[in-house]
Amino acid sequence: MSNAAYVPPKVWKNDAESGGQFSKINRPVAGPTHEKVLPVGKHALQLYSLATPNGVKVTIMLEELLALGKTDAEYDAWLIRIGEGDQFSSGFVDINPNSKIPALLDRSVEPPVRVFESGSILLYLAEKFGALLPTDAAGRTETLNWLFWQMGAAPYLGGGFGHFYVYAPEKIEYAINRFTMEAKRQLDVLDRRLAESPYLGGKDYSIADIAVWSWYGQLVRGTVYNSAEFLDAESYTHIQRWAETIANRPAVVRGLRVNRTWGDEDKQVPERHSAADIR
């Protein structure tokens, strides 16, 4: 273990950078750092995002809606480079005061509706277009159970396990052990649910699967944190079945490419303004 002699001060002050990959953009206050108007395209739905696990939830959702024939779900997807601090522009903060991607502006109504937090965006779009959310009380509730489970659980996976396993400037045994245990507990929760149901909300694919797959499905497939072997991901057989089924959906394949700026060049679509951009 490290930092064994560290004693927290009585009052914390931001006297030095915390180190690590994101130290340049971490700060203890909110609000914009610079003035910049966000671009606006021709479609009613304007998405400002990056292809992180939270970001791809929304691009997958929009591509699924288009695949269902919901033509009004056409959208412009603008790239927000979080490593460069784009999320702290005045325009972005106007849509999401929390300065986190993704953020959506629906200009089909007047005044336009801002939607932030990925789970809120999924729910908003499901209700707006009447898709990927059961209408019966029991099915809707079970789907929302898992949607909100993901929103509450993922910070332990991303900010906890992922941060200390991948991004922290030093490997801290206690932190890695603590959050690995929690990540595996969460995987066990999912595996048990998927042993009894093809999808999280029940027999049908829904916004719950989109939200959870974007983190945990990618995790077990080795495309998030490169930690599948470390977590013994192959042992979660029901998650593996579910994850592969969803990964093979054409809309998921398309959605993963939008706002992506790394990896294979043929899988990168930094900005998307029409279906032709993904072909």
Image (cartoon, helix red, strand yellow):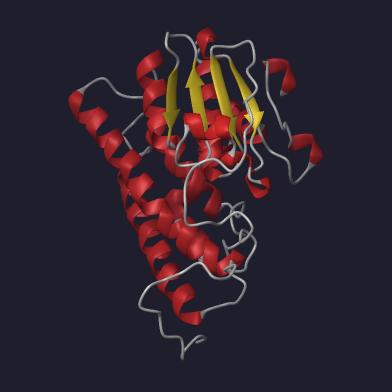
Q: Which residue is pictured at 61% across the width and 58% down the height?
A: 22
Which residue is most to the right? 265
Which residue is most to the bottom? 5
Which residue is most to the left? 137
Q: Position of residue 58 (x, y in %)?
A: 51, 31
Q: Position of residue 113 (x, y in %)?
A: 42, 19
Horizontal side of 80 relative to 199 (left or right) equals right
Q: Which residue is pictured at 72% across the width and 32% down the height?
A: 270
Quadrant in the rendering for residue 46: top right
- Decide: is 42 above or below 88: above
Q: Which residue is pictured at 64% across the width and 37% down the height?
A: 80
- Decide: is 199 above or below 136: below
Q: Position of residue 162 (x, y in %)?
A: 53, 61
Q: Is residue 267 visible?
A: yes
* Total residue callouts: 0
Instruction: Name the residue nearer the viewer: 92 or 225.
Output: 92
Horizontal side of 53 relative to 262 (left or right) equals left
Q: Which residue is pictured at 38% across the width and 23% down the height?
A: 124
Q: Is residue 132 visible?
A: no
- Decide: is 235 above or below 96: below
Instruction: Name the residue nearer the viewer: 271 or 214.
Output: 271
Q: Position of residue 243 (x, y in %)?
A: 50, 44
Q: Quadrant of the C terminus?
A: top right
